[in-house]
Amino acid sequence: MKRIITILLLLMPLTAVAQQLTTKQLLEKYLNKPGFTSVELTKEIFQTNKVKGIDSMVALSTEDGDIAPLFTADATALLSEYKRIMSMVSDGKNVSIHSKSDSAGKIYHLAMFSHSENSAVLILLSGSDIQIEKAMSLIGNGKK
């Protein structure tokens, strides 16, 4: 019995690593699925707008209260690998911005995540040297 418990304890870290959701897995799971609105932009759109450093943008959103909690859990798991650079809570909505940088400090992934009890929106930007100011102008600053 002790041997079985020891083996299980040794395998637990491997199980946790195996369950970590990658960006690709998250997109495959939710992109173009019922209950979700998705938008994908490629590098060409950013070149025409002279926004350098961004190669792609994917936005996923749902207002389906049945699937929003699962999507929120998956997005939160994905973003645990990112550095949170901003967060706020307002009127029951949680909004956060996260980034991933290389060793030189250049941002190559930028994510904005907003969620409440019945809805969730995740915007993912990928590139080689994403400038936060330009990226935020694409995402929007909340002013109308």
Image: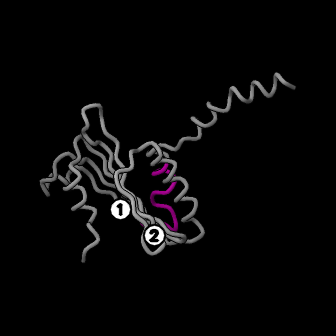
- Determine which quarter of the picture holds residue 81: top left
Which sits earlier in the primary sequence, circle 2 or circle 1? 1
Where residue 15 appears, as percent x and y from the top left, is: 64, 35
- Residue at mark 1: 39
Label 1 crowd (10 A; few <14 / some 14-19 / many >=20): few
x and y percentages locating residue 127 in the rendered image: 26, 44
Residue 6, x across and y down, in percent: 76, 24
Q: Is residue 12 above or below residue 62?
A: above
Q: Residue at x 42, y 71 (%)?
A: 90
Query: Where 86 sits versus 20, above or below?
Result: below
Instruction: Tell me the residue at 57%/65% (across/down).
Output: 67
Q: Quarter of the image holding residue 86?
A: bottom left
At horizontal 26% and vertical 67% (from top left) the residue drawn is 141
Magenta-tinted stretch: 26-37
- Which structural element holds mark 2? strand
Residue 45: which quarter of the image? bottom left
Q: Quadrant of the N terminus?
A: top right
Name above or below for residue 22 compared with residue 121.
above
Residue type, label 2:
Lys
